[in-house]
Image: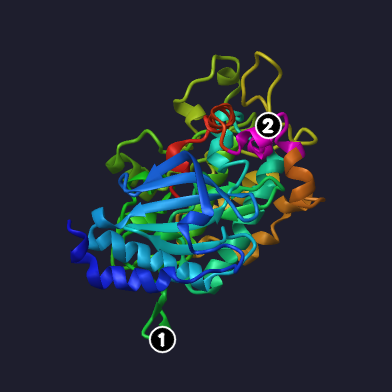
Amino acid sequence: MSFLAHEDSRGSLTSLARWDTMASFQPDSSAYELLTVIGQGLEDLMTVNLARYKPTGEHVAIRRIALESCTNEMVAFLQGELLVSKLFHHPSILPYRSIFIAQNELWIINPFMAYGSARDLISSHFMDGMSELAIAYILLGMLKALEYIHHMGYVHRSVKASHVLIAADGQVCMSGLRSIFSLIRHGQRAKVVHDFPPYSVKVLPWLSPEVLQQNLQGYDFRSDIYSLGITACELANGHVPFKDMPATQMLLEKLNGTVPCLLDSTTIPPEELSMKPSRSGADSGICEGPGACGARHSNGDPSTASSAGGHPYSRTLSPQFHAFVELCLQREPEKRPSATTLIGHPFFKQIKRRPSEALPELFRPLTPITSFDGPQAQGSTAGLSSLESGLSHLEVDDWDF
């Protein structure tokens, strides 16, 4: 499509893109040195670069979107995200440092989150799931973001581990605001919405039954709570429930009340724990129905990994963790607690320290990607090669903010 066809839309984007959240981040492409590509998205019309902000040397992530190739629908989609980004200001939501148009590209400047996304951590280092305590910190950060988003009258609609980014200091931030939807209509707050999230193919396993069902009853903020429960299973089990199912089967399973669960010694039959683990049956993280995961028992402090060579789920997660997930994954939306209520859940009583103190320790031996801070990374081939090696574990789609 010709760029001229976007004259009106582009004018609105230009107006929005003049906003600069922090005066120190100039809305000028010459102030940024592009280092390496760390992701793509929006049907390959968006490139995400790691870059250096020249005036201070700080590293940032830049989303560069080719507006000339965007459809009118995509431009409207981006406008919604930029409007929300101007409205939202919360420590648990990924901030926007600056937004501007450079030639025919929209540039969106975000801080570089040195641990990548929670999905990155699972894919590269915690294939069988993270520790329960690390998950508690991440879920609490997510709930604080969702509490704010819901209070502002919005539904996130894209809650998943790849939209949870973690900074070098352990700060947990939600991203993925492009699919967000307002409940405010004509100055009043609607009880439900019926809009189906566009570009949602990659989000289907996380979506609640009522969003997928698309009936007259609609859905509200409690659909995000269901997605949070799926994300909890994703973080604990190392893979996403329903991920490999055809879309139709996934819908039927969710509508029939099939409940994903945490995989540990209380949910996997003893005979299966003695077998080589697989990604089917009980090991898929899918229960047969409400309560089918059986009684919860704790053998002291929850462990997070079996001994070397043992079954990865020969662990015992806390009853509080199981109860938290089951609350989130209630089939009926009205039975799911709000984000505010869940923040006070007993599951989070195990948190004793600040994330900046605890998460870097819990992620060991993994360290944040800060190797580019050395002088050799300021433009040398060797420095960039080393940097790209450090970034190699990041999944492309996970930086599709």
| Circle on res. 149 | none
Q: Residues within 10 Å of mark 1 (few under 14, many from 20)?
A: few
Looking at the image, which residue is at 74% across and 37% down? 362
Name the element at disc 1: loop
Q: Quadrant of residue 372?
A: top right
Q: Residues within 10 Å of mark 2 (few under 14, many from 20)?
A: some
Answer yes or no: is residue 290 visible: no
Magenta span contains residue 367: yes
Position of residue 164 measured from the top left corner of the image (x, y, whole percent): 56, 49
Residue type indicated by callout 2: Leu
- The residue at the far bottom in this view is 187
Looking at the image, which residue is at 61% across and 35% down? 377
The residues bearing labels 2 and 1 have C-alpha atoms spaced at a distance of 48 Å
Image vertical order of residue 161 relative to residue 384, above or below: below
Position of residue 20 measured from the top left corner of the image (x, y, whole percent): 52, 69
Q: Earlier in the sequence, mark 2 or mark 1?
A: 1
Looking at the image, which residue is at 48% across and 65% down? 221
| Circle on res. 187 | 1
Q: Choose between 45 and 354: the one closer to the eye.
A: 45
Looking at the image, which residue is at 46% across and 61% down? 156
Q: Is 6 on the left or on the right of 133, as rendered?
A: left
Q: Choose between 92 and 315: the one closer to the eye.
A: 92
| Circle on res. 366 | 2
Name the element at disc 2: loop
Give the quarter of the figure containing the N terminus: bottom left
Extent of the magenta region: 361-378
Position of residue 279 measured from the top left corner of the image (x, y, whole percent): 46, 25
Q: Is 28 on the left or on the right of 169, as rendered?
A: left
Residue type indicated by callout 1: Gly
